[in-house]
Amino acid sequence: MPENANLIRNIIGASQYVQDHVIHFYHLHALDWVDVTLALKADPAKTSQLAESISPWPKSSRSYFKAIQDKVKALVESKQLSLFSSGYWGHPAYHLPPEANLLAVAHYIEALEFQKDYIRIHAVLGGKNPHLQTYLVGGMAASMDPNEPGATINTERITLLTELASKAEAFVDQVYVPDVLAVAAFYRDWFGLGEGLGNFLSYGDFPQGGLKDPARFYLPRGAIFSRDLSKVHAVDPANVTEYVTHSWYEYGGGDQSGKNPYQGETNPKYTGPKPPFEHLEVEQKYSWLKAPRYQDHAMEVGPLSRMLVAYASGHAEVKVAVDGVLAKLNAPATALFSTLGRIAARAIEAKVMAAQVTKWVAELGDKLGRGDLRIHNGEKWDPDTWPKEAQGWGFHEAPRGSLGHWVQIEDKKIKNYQAVVPTTWNAGPRDAKGQRGAYEASLLKTPIADPEKPLEILRTVHSFDPCLACAVHVVDARGRRYAPVKAA
């Protein structure tokens, strides 16, 4: 695949990290820590002082925060909280002072505009977001021509990408990271909660030499076991298995053994209680998710895993970013094994990848200027060139974690296809040995102030950024077939 295509894919993937992590912190997770209603009690002048003490971000005046406070007040008085309608406001586990709450609410609103603007990178390079349209076997369907106004990538588009990348670095460095540090300072006990498995997996990603050269991936491949940061183990996809011992599926040879996805089966068989129900029997089958394992170990995947593997591997930029955050928190590296550690890892990764987007855009612009316009290699495009039987493993470190697709091809048709996605790794049930998955393990010993309002549970589960819709296989409950697809 030409280097231009690789650069474009890297820019798309890295910018997805930045946007996704910003959205996760502010719009999917922040309200587990921020009490919006307390922002009404804040002094805008003191909020301005707080903002200026942690960052040079220009939107930090008293009048700015007063305007945000007035907007929130109008929402509360109308009893139509809109975006802020689902919180456990007044919960005793909220510890931020009013001014920190107002600061976070203001940045929540700013982040909405930031992410909308920044993801134009995907519109330029991928045609749309989500579900980009320009990926091809062997490269990208994106023309490069410095002199063609209609080309996907020309001098004007490089200028736009550069501007968007620069804005992202500023937002992450001056808003996102300082906010994470400010929030963490009031919840330091959460560096001791939500630890989980202590096993971390990363397939690695962002090739800088080729897909078959993982040693040169920008984010390294590796596994860490038992919280031991002194050794990063090699990763072989042949060691991935999935169990269905406690899942509502069945394997032809029995449910007590795991199967590598190449031999994987997805045969639904619901044996749970008849809805509606209040409890599941966890000693039986209790989940629509399978239970992935690596070398028969339950593993955590995601930004924390990637940053730990990179840190332990000696990745220069990651080490600087991690050590900088830990120094400001006055915390050891082991503090990352926690709920707050996952949040900090996301912010660190966003910082590292935002800077890398800027570098990759500059590289792409340099190649455009030198007349290197190659963007696709079609040698594998024609199915008639394929062997009669083939199988392959495709991987990606998605924002949520390690994503793998296993496919077997026979006579140019897909014979078997299995995907193991990040939330399956993290949210999967117990296996045949009774080993818990990452969610279950991380919730052990979590103190809960009010069982009717389990805010503490949400904090840890949300720290993984769940996507159960990604992890569950969609089937018809009666096994009916709706649309058979035949090869021409």
Image (spheres, rainbow, N blue to C red):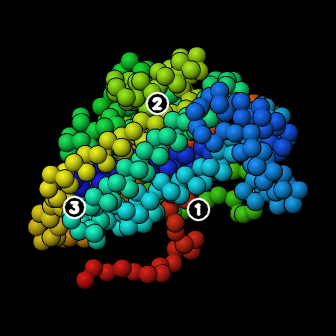
Note whether 277 is above or below 219 in the view shown.
below
Residue drawn at point x = 46 percent, y = 30 percent? 199
Outermost residue to the right: 77
Instruction: Please name whichever residue, 282 or 142, is drawn nearer the observer in this view of the structure.
Output: 142
Q: Residues within 10 Å of mark 1 (few under 14, many from 20)?
A: some
Q: In the rendered image, which quarter contains the N terminus?
A: bottom left
Give SS at disc 1.
Answer: loop
Residue drawn at point x = 42 percent, y = 21 percent? 229
Query: Which residue type does callout 2 highlight?
Result: Asn
Label 2: which residue?
199
Corner quadrant of residue 43: top right
Is the Cβ of the residue at disc 3 closer than 8 Å to that at disc 1? no
Pair 2/1: label in front = 2
Among numbered discs 2 and 3, the one appearing first in the sequence: 3
Image-based side of 37 in relation to 377, left or right: right
Q: Position of residue 144 (x, y in %)?
A: 22, 62
Q: Residues within 10 Å of mark 2 (few under 14, many from 20)?
A: many
Instruction: Please name whichever residue, 176 or 400, is drawn nearer the observer in this view of the structure.
Output: 176
Q: In the rendered image, which quarter contains the C terminus?
A: bottom left
Residue drawn at point x = 58 percent, y = 37 percent? 57
Among numbered discs 2 and 1, the one appearing first in the sequence: 2
Label 3: which residue?
146
Corner quadrant of residue 357: top left
Image-based side of 240 in relation to 245, left or right: left
Label 1: which residue?
270
Query: Which residue type does callout 3 highlight?
Result: Pro
Q: Position of residue 35 (x, y in %)?
A: 78, 41
Note whether 197 is above or below 83 in the view shown.
above
Give SS at disc 2.
Answer: loop
Residue drawn at point x = 62 percent, y = 28 percent? 54
Is the Cβ of the residue at disc 2 closer than 8 Å to that at disc 3? no
